[in-house]
Structure formats: structure tokens, C-alpha cells
């Protein structure tokens, strides 16, 4: 096979390798990207953190209500026991009972509000938990697919590397050096087709002499405009 043709074959393999490598890089980045689940996890933690003082407040109000009720019952029992005879003392107790009843009413109201706040926060925690579970499951599924694709690409890349080496072995050191020198400057595409007298990459029409030389393909011919190695297309 003519050298230019072989270089085109080499280029096709290397472009394919680059596509594989790019996808492998994308996959690595996707596998490492845990932003979504991290954010969901952080939200769960924040809701949990907000919930604990609300629960403590609710529990404290319950205890205070309990002790107020007990104190009220005890004072009432004492007042109606008939043991207290002093009118001033009885009046003080009646006033205390009234104050305890007011306090109990306030506590009941505040406790109800606190319990509702706890319920709201618990409901938000359930939602946040469900979101985290869903996102984690989705990520696990996606990562399983990506890992499978990664393994396939690695196998494919190894096969392409072997193929490239075999193809490169059929190219002279001089031509390979020329190809490799052009490659980084030509966006990994140092070889172009000469189609109907024009370069397939830059589109510039070539001279008759260039076209004839490319057709003979005894030596490497380059595009007069972009400098790419030309392969005559029959
Ligand atoms: Zn060109």
C-alpha cells in the first residue's frame, strides 16, 4: 500500500483513539461528580439539625405543662380539703390557682405550635430523605452503566493501540516523522483527501502537477494551502 494511504489509515485509527480517550475522560469526570447527592445529603443534615432544637423545645414545654398541671391539682386539693381556714391564705391560693390556669392555657397553646413546627420539619425531613434516596439510586444506576462503558472503551482502546502500532510499522521513519510533526499543528488531522482536484480539508484546488504526483503516490505530496499530506481519491 502506498505510504500516503497507510498514513490516512493511521490517522483514522488515531482519531478513533482520541474519541475513545475523550469519552473515557468524560466518564471519569461523571463518575467523580457527586454534587447532586452531596447537596441532597447536606439538605438532609440541615433539616435534621433544625429539627433537634424544635423537638427539645416541644419536650420542655410538655414537661412544664405537666408540672404546672400537677401544681394546680395539688393547690386545688389543698384548697378544697377544708384544712386551710385563714381567709387571707385561701384568697392567695385562689389567686395562685387562677394564675396556674392561665399559665396552663398559655403552655397548651405554645406546645401546640411547637408540635406543629416539629411535624412540619419532620415532613420536610421525609421529603429530603426521599430525594436523597432517589438521587443515590439514580447515581448508582448511572455509574454502573458508565463503568460498563468504561471497560468496553478500555478494551477497544487497547485493540486500537495494537492496530495503530501494526499500521505504523508499515510506514517509513521519515514519513512517520513528517506525519507526527504535522499532527499537532493540524488538529490531529495531518492527512487530507485529494478529491476532484481539491484538498478535502481546506477545500483549495491543487495544481495539475500536485494532482498527478498524488495519483502516482510514489512520494508524499502536501496541500499547497494547508500543508496536509494528500491522499489521491480514486
Ligand atoms: Zn489543504
Image (cartoon, grey):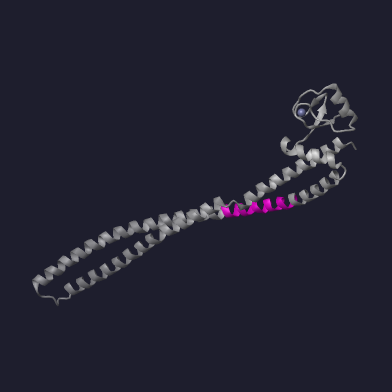
x and y percent of residue 124 in the render? 45, 54
> The C terminus is located in which quarter?
top right
Q: Which image quarter has ligand 1? A: top right
Toward the left, the furthest residue is: 87
- Front-most of residues 11 and 51: 11
- Position of 142 relative to 85 (above/below): above
Residue drawn at x 25%, y 63% is 104
Majority SS type along the magenta span: helix
Q: Can residue 234 be seen in this view?
A: no
Question: Along the horizontal axis of the image, is 122 left or right of 167?
Answer: left
- Front-most of residues 220 and 194: 220
> The N terminus is located in which quarter?
top right
Residue drawn at x 9%, y 71% is 87
> Which image quadrant is residue 187 in?
top right
- Front-most of residues 66 and 194: 194
Q: Can residue 154 be seen in this view?
A: yes
> Which image quadrant is residue 17 in?
top right
- Position of 226 relative to 103 (above/below): above
Tell whether position 146 is magenta.
yes
**The residue stretch that appears in magenta:** 135-152
x and y percent of residue 206 in the render? 81, 23
Question: Along the horizontal axis of the image, is 64 left or right of 45?
Answer: left
x and y percent of residue 64 in the render? 29, 66
Residue drawn at x 88%, y 25% is 212
Amino acid at each position: 500500500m502506498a505510504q500516503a494511504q497507510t498514513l490516512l489509515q493511521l490517522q483514522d485509527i488515531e482519531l478513533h483513539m482520541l474519541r475513545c480517550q475523550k469519552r473515557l475522560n468524560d466518564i471519569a469526570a461523571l463518575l467523580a461528580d457527586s454534587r447532586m447527592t452531596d447537596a441532597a445529603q447536606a439538605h438532609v443534615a440541615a433539616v435534621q439539625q433544625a429539627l433537634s432544637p424544635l423537638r427539645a423545645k416541644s419536650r420542655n414545654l410538655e414537661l412544664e405543662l405537666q408540672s404546672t398541671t400537677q401544681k394546680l391539682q395539688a393547690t386545688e386539693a389543698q384548697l378544697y380539703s377544708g384544712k386551710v381556714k385563714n381567709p387571707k391564705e385561701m384568697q392567695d391560693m385562689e389567686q395562685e390557682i387562677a394564675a396556674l390556669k392561665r399559665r396552663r392555657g398559655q403552655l397548651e397553646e405554645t406546645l401546640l405550635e411547637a408540635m406543629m413546627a416539629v411535624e412540619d420539619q419532620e415532613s420536610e425531613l421525609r421529603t429530603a430523605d426521599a430525594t436523597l434516596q432517589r438521587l443515590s439510586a439514580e447515581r448508582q444506576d448511572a455509574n454502573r452503566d458508565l463503568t460498563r462503558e468504561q471497560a468496553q472503551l478500555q478494551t477497544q482502546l487497547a485493540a486500537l493501540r495494537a492496530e495503530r502500532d501494526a499500521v505504523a510499522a508499515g510506514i517509513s521513519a521519515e514519513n512517520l516523522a513528517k506525519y507526527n510533526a504535522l499532527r499537532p499543528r493540524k488538529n490531529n488531522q495531518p492527512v487530507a483527501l485529494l478529491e476532484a482536484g481539491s484538498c478535502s480539508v481546506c477545500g483549495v484546488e491543487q495544481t495539475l502537477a500536485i494532482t498527478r504526483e498524488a495519483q502516482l503516490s510514489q512520494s508524499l505530496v502536501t496541500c499547497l494551502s494547508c500543508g496536509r499530506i494528500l491522499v489521491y481519491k480514486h
